[in-house]
Image (spheres, rainbow, N blue to C red):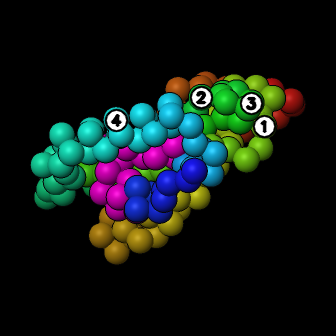
Amino acid sequence: MSWPSEPYYYIAQASRPDICHAVNYLARFSMGTDQSHWNALEHLIAYMRATRNMGILIAANNQSSELKCYVDTNWGGEGDHSTHGYLIMHGKNPISWQSKRQTTVASSTAQAEYMSLLFAVRECIWVSNLFQPILGNSVPIMLSDNKTAVGISTASMSRKQT
């Protein structure tokens, strides 16, 4: 039995970053579901109903004119594939977000985090170009909790196998 994941993907990508990871995870089982997956889907729907009046409020932002990108990864998740996520903010306003399973198996936490940084940087470049008429040539601030991945990406560390 299968369930249609497309409507949930649309909702997660368009307006609900809080369900992005759950939808991504459930979509992995959309073609081979069992009762536990249906229970998880029912839980997600109940959560969405309970929080239907919550949403993203885009407010005027006089305090900060910079983009910040928060990036994180779980290394070696299910099937040894890591899952990464990022959130790009302009002040307190979420602009872009994603939670996705990596297609390449990383050999270390640093490698998984570095691959996540690459995905996030690509999106940051696109968002930065989109906001260029408003923000000018500002450089987005990338925030990651893995010092090795940050060091590799800033060329302050060796690029040997991590």
- Whether 82 is among the magenta residues is no
Looking at the rendered structure, the kind of residue marked 2 is Asn
Q: CA distance from mark 2 to mark 1?
A: 12 Å
Q: Which residue is mark 2?
A: 74
- Circles 3 and 1, Cβ within 8 Å, touching? The answer is yes
Residue at x 18% of width, y 57% of height = 58
Residue that mark 4 sits on: 43
Above or below 114: residue 128: below
Q: Which residue type does callout 3 highlight?
A: Asp
Depth check, mark 2 against mark 3: the one in front is: 3
Of discs 3 and 4, which sits in the foreground? 4
Q: CA distance from mark 2 to mark 4?
A: 23 Å
Residue to which mark 1 is pinned: 105
Residue 131 position, x and y percent, is 37, 68
For the residues labelled 1 and 4, the Cα–Cα distance comes to 30 Å
Magenta stretch in the rendered image: 10-26
Name the disc covering residue 80, or none.
Answer: 3
Q: Residue furthest bottom?
A: 133
Nearer to us in this view, 30 or 22: 30
- As displayed, is residue 117 above or below residue 132? above
Q: Are marks 2 and 4 in contact (CB under 8 Å)?
A: no
